[in-house]
Image: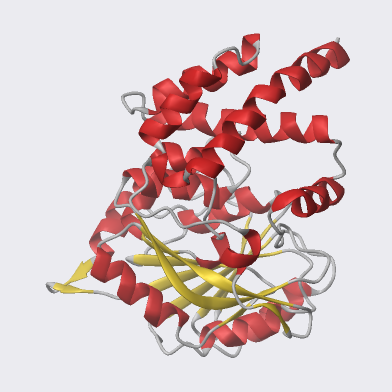
Amino acid sequence: MGHVSTFTHSMGTGPSGLIVASCRDRESSLTGGGKMSQQIDVLMATYNGARFVRQQIDSILDQTHSELRLIILDDCSSDGTYEMLLAVAERDSRICVKRVTENRGIAATFETLLRCVTAPFFALADQDDVWRKDKLEVQLGCLIREKAAIVFSDVEVVDEKLNTLKSSMRQYAGYKPMAGAGPIAYLVKNSVTGCTVVGDSRMLLHALPFPKSVKTHDWWLAAIAARYGGLVFEQTATVKYRQHGANDTGAHRRGLYGLCRRLKAKGLTFSEYLIYRHERRWNLAVEYHRRFPGDSVGEYVGLIGENQSNGFKNSANYWRCLRKNAHQLGLRTIAIEVFMEAITRFALPLKRVARK
């Protein structure tokens, strides 16, 4: 029988409603009798996912790497998801189901889940995907071999019935993995698909707690991992990434067509998108620099902060900063980033006027 609980009380030093794994818990779980444990805490956030969640749970429990615990946190579903989870947990002791008492959103939900990690490794899971049977075995092997903080992988883009739409989202979306990249590259562009992440739990000592302004959990984790141990990309598509019209993120093509789809999905004009895009980067970079003030990110923060306050007047300096500290992005991506930040100066004054 699995474990079931609700977050209605406090434990340890965490915020109300959180169960917090202490640093001692995480560090002591990394070794046992001199032998490295390969236990993995798989973390799944659910919200009104009754249509697909059972199939995803089955694919996780059926992994070739069986040393796992599946921790599921339901974010106040209203479609019977939580009741379904309770029934599934009754039949498998590896499942731990928890529930919050009010809807908090995906980033806060995953932060809560990450606080529950006590195993030496963790993995992130979406509620509506299906994992390849050897996903954990392949990625954990890579993580240990490369001594990385995070291993993420490609995904196969599929429709609701799991029919293949694109065999590789990396090729479909046009992003390139950034081997050896530092934090600035990941602060500029998040190339990590969160639902594929397998990580070393020791990095959570630096990632938690999340800054309040962070809205994208995998982006924050990627930036932290770039500083502590690095990231490795596994080319194997380890996840069937289901597209069904109600995805929290979803797969978008590169180029103008992909941009138009993002604007439509978010209900934004191009000007509003520029502001949204800029402020996400600004907030993430500022919070990162506050946590690690001695890092080289300070130059980057100063440059995009110039855009935030006075308009971006020195694109050449921004170009040089990215070429120096984030060259793994590639010239094309850097050029697009410099251009987008430069034209944002026209959108930011409009926002200030609208707020008056």
Q: Position of residue 239 (x, y in %)?
A: 57, 76
Q: Position of residue 8 (x, y in %)?
A: 63, 53
Residue 289: tell me if it is visible.
Answer: no
Q: Position of residue 120 (x, y in %)?
A: 32, 65
Q: Is residue 133 above or below residue 181?
A: below
Q: Residue at x 36, y 66 (%)?
A: 121
Q: Quadrant of the N terminus?
A: bottom right
Residue 298: tell me if it is visible.
Answer: yes
Q: Residue at x 64, y 80 (%)?
A: 56
Q: Is residue 41 above or below residue 52?
A: above
Q: Residue at x 50, y 31 (%)?
A: 285
Q: Is residue 199 above or below residue 190?
A: below
The answer to whether residue 205 is left or right of residue 17 is left
The answer to whether residue 81 is left or right of residue 56 is right
Toward which corner of the image does residue 215 lie, by quadrant? Answer: top right
Near-viewer residue (262 or 56) = 262
